[in-house]
Amino acid sequence: MNKQYQSVDDAQAQTTLPEAAAKCSVVLEVHGSGRQIRLDCPFSCPGDHAGKRELSVDTGNPQKVFACHAYQCQMRGNLLTLMHGWLTGTRPTGDKLKGEEFKRVRGVLLGDSPSPAGGPVPSSVAKSAELKTLPARNVPLAQSENEKARELVTLDEKFLRDVAHMPPTAASYVRRHVCLTTAMMEKWRVGVLPQDGGPDKRGWSLRGQVLYPILGEDGKLLAWAARDPQFETKEQAFNALRPDERAKEKKPAKHRFPVDFHRGQELFGQHAGRLVEPGFREVIAECGILVVEGFNDVLGLDGIGVPAVAIMSNKITEQQVSKIERFAKNLGGGKVTLLFDNDDAGDDGAKESLWLLGQRGLDVRLGWSRAMHGGKFAGRQPENLTGDEWEKAIRPGIVRQ
């Protein structure tokens, strides 16, 4: 077909991913086979997902639609958008490919213009190698070069912990999660920012959100993570859109992390000060390091005297695997227990974690699953586990001497 009359849609349908990558001078590292494959994200987003194959591509779709599943990215688009990332290493302006950016990528796809466009083409492979040689490190907020960041060390002074004074959506969220008692929120420095931002404007963009502190192993504050109490409502509205409408919208995010924070380097609840709590060392010695998905899971288990750490996702990173390995060998005799959410996403995350941790020579066990314990815990999350259920059902199955 004459390129002059070839439509962009036809070109996308007729171009394979390797062919598109070659036009951008990029060598792909593909994970998986069949219709759904995973690639490294090329959009240079801050965070921990570079080199983690967080970008899922539907190769069966004529436009090769994709979505990045990293918390801090969530980029979505088609083959043209992906090629823009390969060519520039950045997101399109406003996350929408249009104007001169669109024309440039269209020209590369149709073969009407060279890919470098005045400079070397950034390669996702090269970026991954660079990141591996320069590992990310999270700096405590108190030591940040950014004055605004340093001011956030005491952000919890503004937090609301009485549901009577919270915005309605945040109050509803807190009531639904029984682990978020006033006492537990005070202990863990968790709370809700006032809807008006309070007397001062620190954390203004997070007003009305539920905030959790992420501490380093030494107990120093590294970042505040925000949970959107309206996420479920927004997600339902997003899923109700037609597929073509969803492709144009940004998927709602459940959590927000600072753009310069590398989530995958840390574990929520990793601070060593917890080891002085009564019975914690004994549980770890018998059951190993307990690994869960989310913030509330850690709080809920803490409330019944069970120490756990969270990966803040259902997908574990290599850095988190290394940290859990170190904790397990130093404190738990090489033992690890997984207590992920008993749903599809939790099953997928537990399988991958079991594989990665098992390769480190660790004694890894599942604390539960949808099929274990006669299906009693199907659909459950660790945050709702009771002390009686822990002692009679879970603990006996994971104790190792």
Image: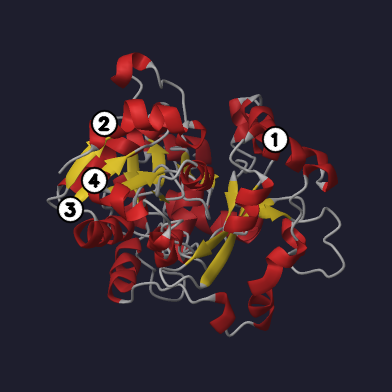
Mark 4 lies on a secondary structure that is helix
Left or right of 24 on screen, residue 68: right
* Amino acid under disc 2: Pro
Which secondary structure, mark 2?
helix
Whether residue 111 is situated above or below residue 330 in the rendered picture: above
Disc 3 or disc 2, which is closer to the eye?
2
**Badge 2 density bin: few <14, some 14–19, many ≥20, Cα 10 Å:** few
**Looking at the rendering, in which quadrant would you find the N terminus?**
top left
Please tell me the numbered disc located at residue 396.
2
Q: Which mark is residue 286?
A: 4
The three-letter code of the residue at mark 4 reads Glu
Sequence-first disc among 3 and 4: 4
Q: Toward the viewer: 126 or 99?
A: 126
| Mark 3 to mark 4 CA distance (whole Å) | 11 Å
Q: Is residue 10 visible?
A: yes
| Crowd around label 4: few <14 · some 14–19 · many ≥20 (10 Å) | some
Q: Where residue 384 appears, x then y in whole percent?
A: 51, 32
* Relative horizontal placement of residue 31, taking residue 57 as reference (left or right): left
Q: Nearer the viewer, residue 174 or 143?
A: 174
First of labels 2, 1 by sequence position: 1
